[in-house]
Amino acid sequence: MAETEQDREPGGRPRAYRVAELAEAAGVSVRTVRFYRERRLLQPPRKEGRIAWYGDEHLARLRLIAELLDRGHALGGIAELIGAGEDGRDVAELIGLRAALVAPWSDETPVHLGWDELRAAFGDQLTEANTAESVAQGYITVDPDGITHVSRRLMDATVALVGEGVPLAAVLDVSRRASEYADAMADVFVALVRDHVFGALARVRDLAPAEAARLTEQVERVRPLARAVNEAQFALAMDRRVRAEYDRLTGR
């Protein structure tokens, strides 16, 4: 949490707090401050004789702990996050931001087909060229007893299209082009998140725990929105294109 004007002495000097003043500024009890000291969540104060003086860094730490507690983190986890930040470890990974960013977007199930099944589905279109093209697109791996496709849905769609009379080579050509368009759409959304969610952030590793927690929640909210927009845009584009093509075929 950002420092406020009330956190500084007149003239801009950092404030010094006794324990009761620190507790009041942070909105917690003196007992809570001492408890955090005992748990080593709060840095030791500066001692002058028998008086313990706390500074702005202590107030910032108390506000950070309060914010992380509000976000549902347990004290044990907060201690680990604070320790990670002090040791230069990856706070974003501990708090779940990395997992939220790189979690799989697809929920596809791989499927294995033997050579007899493939010949039954594709006949003489099961050529070395078509197989090599599928491998090059990254959809299949070839085994001695057949192939493994990364997506049962895509494999089923391919078999169905060939069954409707569409050449396998044409399906693979459309697949390659559609993949390129999908990559372009993904680039658009990655840039959107990079520019407007992460802003001027230089490195994820440099995030404070509270900021990493906030970004984690925001990324988890944005993920389904990106998928919904992509699906809606594709459906609307199909509406426009199919109607235009029908009008062309009917001479309208």
Image (cartoon, rainbow, N blue to C red):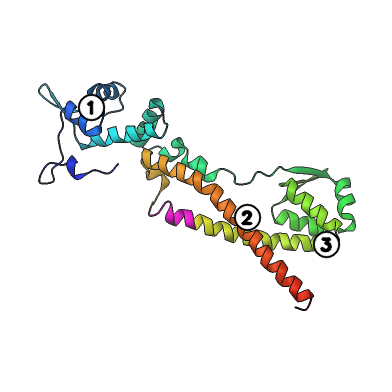
Which of disc 2 and disc 1 is earlier in sequence?
Answer: 1
Q: Which residues are magenta?
A: 192-200
Whole-percent x and y of residue 86?
Answer: 33, 35
Q: Residue 90: in sight, yes or no?
A: no
Image point 11% across, 21% down: which residue?
50
Crowdedness near tag 1: few (<14), some (14–19) or many (≥20) residues, C-alpha within 10 Å:
few
Name the kind of residue labelled 1 in the image. Pro
Q: Which residue is mark 1?
A: 44
How far separated are the C-alphas under marks 1 and 3?
74 Å
Image point 79% across, 75% down: which residue?
250
Crowdedness near tag 2: few (<14), some (14–19) or many (≥20) residues, C-alpha within 10 Å:
few
Q: Which residue is mark 3?
A: 166
Between residue 250 and residue 145, name the one nearer to us. Answer: 250
User: 204 above or below 191?
Assistant: above
How far separated are the C-alphas under marks 3 and 2?
24 Å
- Mark 2 lies on a secondary structure that is helix
- Mark 1 lies on a secondary structure that is loop
